[in-house]
Amino acid sequence: MLTVDEVGAIPLFSGLPAGEMERLARTAADLHLSAGEFAVHEGGEAALFAVLAGKIEVVKTFDGIERTLGWRLPGTIFGEVPIALGSGFPGGYRAAEPSRVMRLELQQYYSLAAVSKDVAQKVSALARERMGGLQSITAEPQQPRVTLVGHRWDTACGELRRFLARNQISFNWLLPDTADAEAFWAGRPAFDGPVARLADGEIMENPAVRDLAIRLGLQTRPRGTEYDVAIIGGGPAGLAAAVYGASEGLRTIVVEREAPGGQAGTSSRIENYLGFPSGISGDELASRALQQSRRLGAEILVTRAVAGIRYGHA
C-alpha cells in the first residue's frame, strides 16, 4: 500500500496539499513488477504512472523491430502523451528490473488536475516535449528490412513478396536486369532464383518462406507445449477469438499459414465491420487486431498449417 511519503517523493506531486497526497496514497494503484513485466503495453488505455522504485524501459515496435526509446527512473512519470492526445500509449513500458510504480486511472488524474493547475501544466508541458521526441524518431528514414532480387514471373519470388507484404515487413524488390540489381550483384556470382539480403547484410539464396520468417524474428514455433485454446487461421474471426480467449486468462495460440489478417488484410476498404461506421482498411484492421491479441498474451504463429486434429485423450 502506498504511503504519503512515497507519493510526496514524486516531484510532480510534492507540492500537493496534504489531503490530496493522502487521497492519492489511498486510491492510486500500487503495482509491483517483475523484470520483463509490462506496466502498460503499446496501445494500452491512457493512465498516469509514476515510478517509485526500479527501472522502466520504454519500447516501441517499428517495422516489426522493437526499439528502446528511453528509461523511466524513480521519481519520473509516464502516460502524459496518451492523456494529452486522448489516445492509447504510443509505446510499451516494461520493467528492466524488479520495479514498483503507482498508477492513476484517467478519471483520477482529471480529478487531481481540477484541484491542481500546477500538476496539469507540468503534465501538459512534458507531453509536448515528449511528443516532439516521438515525432523526430518517426521521421527518421527507415531502411527496408529486406532487399529481394528476383524475376517478375518467378513463383518463388512472388511468394516471398506476398509474404513480406502481408506481414508488413518493409522490402525493396529489384529485377535482375536492372542497374540497381547489377550493383547488388557486384563481386558475387549471380544466382538462379530469388535472393534476399537482410538489413544486417546477410544473404539468403532462394530462401524458404519459413526460413526467412525465422531470420526476421517472426514467431514460427510455439513457446509452450500445452494451450487452453488453439485457433486455426488468423483472419478477423481468428484474431477476435484470440482476444476473447487471452483476455479471459486462457493460454491461447493462433496457427496461421501465411499472415495475420487473412483475406481481410488485403482489402483496400471494409465497410461492414462492426464498430467502424466510416469503414477501415483491411491492413489497419488486421494490424489493430494483431496488436490487441498479442497485448493480451496470445501467441500468433505464421508459416504453419494444421495437418489434422486428433480427438480424445493422449
Image (cartoon, rainbow, N blue to C red):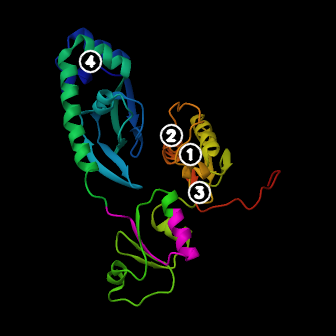
Q: Earlier in the sequence, mark 4 or mark 1?
A: 4
Query: Looking at the picture, which amino acid does disc 1 mark?
Result: Ala
Label 2: few (<14), some (14–19) or many (≥20) C-alpha neighbours in 10 Å: some
* CB atoms of marks 2 and 4 within 8 Å: no
Q: Residue 255 in the image: x percent, y percent?
A: 63, 54
Residue 179 in percent (x, y) is at: 33, 81
Name the residue type under label 3. Pro
In front of the other: 124 or 267: 267
Q: Quadrant of the N terminus?
A: top left
Per the image, the residue denoted by label 4 is 4
Q: Which residue is mark 1?
A: 298
Task: Measure how far apart labels 4 and 3 are at the Cα level.
Answer: 45 Å
Say whether residue 157 is magenta. Answer: yes
Left or right relative to 263: residue 99: left
Q: Mark 4: give few (<14), some (14-19) or many (20+) Cα within 10 Å.
A: some
Span shown in magenta: 143-163
Q: Quadrant of residue 85?
A: top left
Q: Nearer the viewer, mark 4 or mark 3?
A: 3
Q: Residue at x 65, y 51 (%)?
A: 233
Amino acid type at image mark 2: Ile
| Residue 296 vs residue 94, the one in the foreground | 296
What number of labels is visible?
Answer: 4
Amino acid type of the residue that numbered disc 4 sits on in the rendered structure = Val
The disc placed on residue 280 is 2
Q: Where residue 222 is drawn, which disc sits there?
A: 3
Find numbered disc 1 in the image and state the secondary structure of the residue it sits on.
loop
Dot 4: what SS? helix
Q: Assess whether mark 2 and mark 1 are in contact (beta carbons under 8 angstroms).
A: no
Please, is residue 62 above or below residue 80 in the view? below
Query: Cα distance, mark 2 to mark 3?
Result: 31 Å
